[in-house]
Image (spheres, coloured by chain):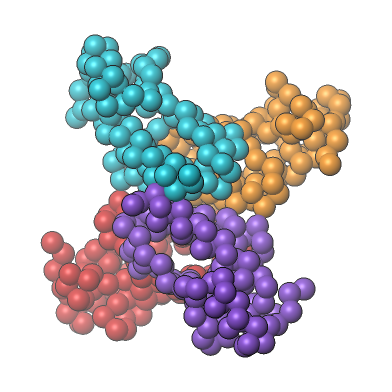
Chain colours: A purple, B red, C orange, D cyan
Amino acid sequence: MAKALSEMEVAKFLKSSLKEWTFEDNSIKRDVKFKTFVEAFSFITTIAMEAEKMDHHPNWSNSYNKVKIALTTDSEKSVTQLDFDLATIIDSTYEKYMQGVK
Amino acid sequence: MAKALSEMEVAKFLKSSLKEWTFEDNSIKRDVKFKTFVEAFSFITTIAMEAEKMDHHPNWSNSYNKVKIALTTDSEKSVTQLDFDLATIIDSTYEKYMQGVK
Amino acid sequence: MAKALSEMEVAKFLKSSLKEWTFEDNSIKRDVKFKTFVEAFSFITTIAMEAEKMDHHPNWSNSYNKVKIALTTDSEKSVTQLDFDLATIIDSTYEKYMQGVK
Amino acid sequence: MAKALSEMEVAKFLKSSLKEWTFEDNSIKRDVKFKTFVEAFSFITTIAMEAEKMDHHPNWSNSYNKVKIALTTDSEKSVTQLDFDLATIIDSTYEKYMQGVK
């Protein structure tokens, strides 16, 4: 069971590793943007598969080429290591898309 | 080009055909729920393909087994026939899932 | 580690539980059919997510509304319990589609 | 309606533009490979959406990180411009993945 992290622990991890994420409403959040809906949806599919495999799912929304992501651990009503793990996968997946579309 | 519909036209269509939808913030809205994330995501994939084909895309969010959908036509800053068409596809797709999981 | 099953064990399981499957070339096989490509692809997405979660993946092909599936366990060069498990998920998923599209 | 192309026309187009494709059994064919199943499936989803939009679908198979693609136009029992168009989308999509995973 992932355990709740203090605000200070979250802030530290965001500063060192998840630089594009913010902490708000008990969630860590990142917005990403693509060229097209198809590209955004291909990213969404990748993250959906990774999330299902971890049994830890994002709260997210999509409008055309934009995806807003919020991660939290419901059972802890807080951010946990699970959220950091999923955020790290999201970052590396998005990085690949950005390199691919240069 | 789809043309903006009056609030009265939208209200009438919702009452006659899109009974599960509400009208709010220049959008028609419906929330749907599934048993699992995998089922929700399979529904999302179906709608994504239909939306891309129509070149008319939803504003939507997902949390585990729940999907919230809002449809509007950006170019008109209003609801148009395109939104009714996509909502009709969404309803018939959701209906199939609900029959399938009885 | 899933262990290789004898031809007799496979035949028995197919007869009792996986009635739509055949055993051929060290794989168990089933072909399924949908109304449209979108429906076939929604099914494919569901199975892809389940397969990734199990870390056990099908050999499959798709032509429009048709999907041909072959399951085997590479490490054993044979059918194992993993294939039965994935086949059972495939059957119950397909069943839902068929109920949904009646 | 896309019209059937002669073998010579196909050969010429393959040589000039679709260099990774071969012509065989009335189809043009290409095999592609990814690092993981998730990456392969993300590619598959992208192509599925593009194919549905064109209303022209591939014959394809997938085994873990490999995807084999064959394109033909059933109504013409031959390769047509539609196949070249879809092959071009496939190439540029695959190219993005390869740049992204360098």
- What's the residue at 74%, 79% (across, down)? A3
Q: Position of residue D101 (x, y in %)?
A: 49, 46
Q: Position of residue C94 (x, y in %)?
A: 59, 45
Left or right: where does residue B34 sit relative to residue C15? Answer: left
Q: Position of residue C4 (x, y in %)?
A: 84, 31
- Please tell me in which quadrant of the rendered image residue B54 appears: bottom left
- What's the residue at 81%, 27% (across, down)? C11
- What's the residue at 52%, 42% (across, down)? D40
- Please tell me in which quadrant of the rendered image residue B26 appears: bottom left
- Please tell me in which quadrant of the rendered image residue B12 appears: bottom left
- What's the residue at 25%, 22% (across, down)? D16
Vertical side of B7 occupied by A54: above or below: above
Could one spot residue B49 in this view of the protein? no
Could one spot residue C19 in this view of the protein? yes
Q: Position of residue A6 (x, y in %)?
A: 67, 87
Vertical side of A99 occupied by D2: above or below: above
In depth, the one of D41 and D36 nearer the eye is D36
The quadrant the N terminus of chain A occupies is bottom right
In the image, farthest residue toward the front: A16
Left or right: where does residue A4 sit relative to residue A95? Answer: right
In depth, the one of B85 and D41 nearer the eye is D41
Q: How many marks?
A: 0
